[in-house]
Each structure stands twice: as structure tokens, then as C-alpha cells.
Image (cartoon, grey):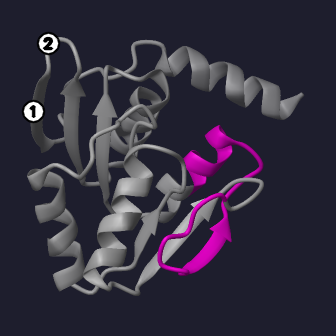
Amino acid sequence: MGSSAFKARELPVEVKERIDLAIDRGMEIIVGEAQGASRLYQDYLKAKGYRNVVVGHAVRLRYNAGKWKDMQYGKDLKERERKMIEDCDSAIIIWMNNSGVIAENLELLKRLGKPTFLYEYSSKPNEARAGELDPRRTYDPFYHMKEYYRKRKATN
């Protein structure tokens, strides 16, 4: 998954390498269908001719480049992303400009102990770094508060 604001024309080399490893291992790849990074993932997988792909969506499917199997993971963005994260074994994430939604997802991945490759991009000053998710780093300082209110809302 990744930031919808990521407007590059193609995936970064580091991300392509990680996807290629998943393809070489024959892994099922769950991918989103929103604008930005998810569509780049789909376009890359289609160009590779990879078929073991599931497109996760919420209410309706908006994009499916390879006409792969699709699955409704929730009724809204947050539920969809949470369920996709719970369903995956590992993740490749493109995080742009410290997006809050992605930050929340990174915290969830970290807490679930799922191996995650993170490509972090900042448009100002146009810098990128890539590597494994750091279990000691705080990606979303409000994560615990959000979880508290989410659980509280669910019980009411």
C-alpha cells in the first residue's frame, strides 16, 4: 500500500526489487486500488504478467489493471486498510510526506510484527530513504489515542 499523493510515473527501484522478490517466491500479493502508489503497484504487476494478485477495495472497485481477483475488505478506507494489514504476512509501503493514514498503518504493522519494507519520500526537500520498518521509531504519535477511541466507539 502507499500514499495516494505519490505521483511518480513509476515505482522506485527499491520497491520494484522487493516486489520482484515476492514474485520470485510466488507470493499472493494483496494490493489496493486508490490513486497514487497502489495504481503504480498494479501497473507494475500487470507489466510483469503476474497473476497471483488480489485487489482489495472498500465499497466499490475503482481500478483493477490486471483483471485479478478482487475482495472487499471493509466499508471504508480505514476498515479496508486495517483488514488488508491483518490479512497480509508482510508489506511494502510507500509513505509520502508523513501522511497520517499511512503513519497509522505503519504503527499497526509494527505492533503486529509484520515484516515491512518502507520507502519514505518527502517532496520537500525531494528526499527519499528506504529500508525495513524500525520497531523503535514512532510513526504516528497519536496512534494509541486513536486506538483507544476506536475501541471505545466499537463497544458503544
Q: Residues within 10 Å of mark 1 (few under 14, many from 20)?
A: few
Mark in the foreground, 1 or 2 = 2
Point out the stretch of residues depicted in magenta: 62-83
Residue drawn at x 42%, y 43% as measured from the top left: 36
Residue drawn at x 23%, y 80% as measured from the top left: 23
**Residue position for label 1:** 129
Picture layout, residue 55 above or below residue 79: below
- Between the C-alphas of marks 1 and 2, the distance is 12 Å
Q: Is 110 positioned to the left or the right of 25 in the image?
A: right
Amino acid type of the residue tagged 2 in the rendering: Pro
Q: Is residue 135 visible?
A: no
Q: Is 154 positioned to the left or the right of 102 in the image?
A: right
- Residue 127: name its quadrant: top left
**Residue position for label 2:** 125
Report the residue that reaches farthest toward the right.
156
Q: Nearer the viewer, residue 113 or 48?
A: 48
Circles 1 and 2, Cβ within 8 Å, touching? The answer is no
Q: Secondary structure at mark 1?
A: strand
The label number, if any, that marks residue 16 in the structure image: none
Q: Is residue 98 visible?
A: yes
Q: Give percent across and percent down for residue 83.
A: 59, 54
Q: Secondary structure at mark 2?
A: loop
Picture layout, residue 109 above or below residue 122: below
Amino acid type of the residue tagged 1 in the rendering: Arg
Residue drawn at x 31%, y 34% as measured from the top left: 95
Q: Is residue 96 magenta?
A: no
Q: Residues within 10 Å of mark 2 (few under 14, many from 20)?
A: few
Q: Give percent across and percent down for residue 37.
A: 37, 47
Q: Give percent across and percent down for residue 87.
A: 51, 64
Q: Nearer the viewer, residue 42 or 90?
A: 42
Residue drawn at x 90%, y 28% as measured from the top left: 156
- Residue 62: name its quadrant: bottom right
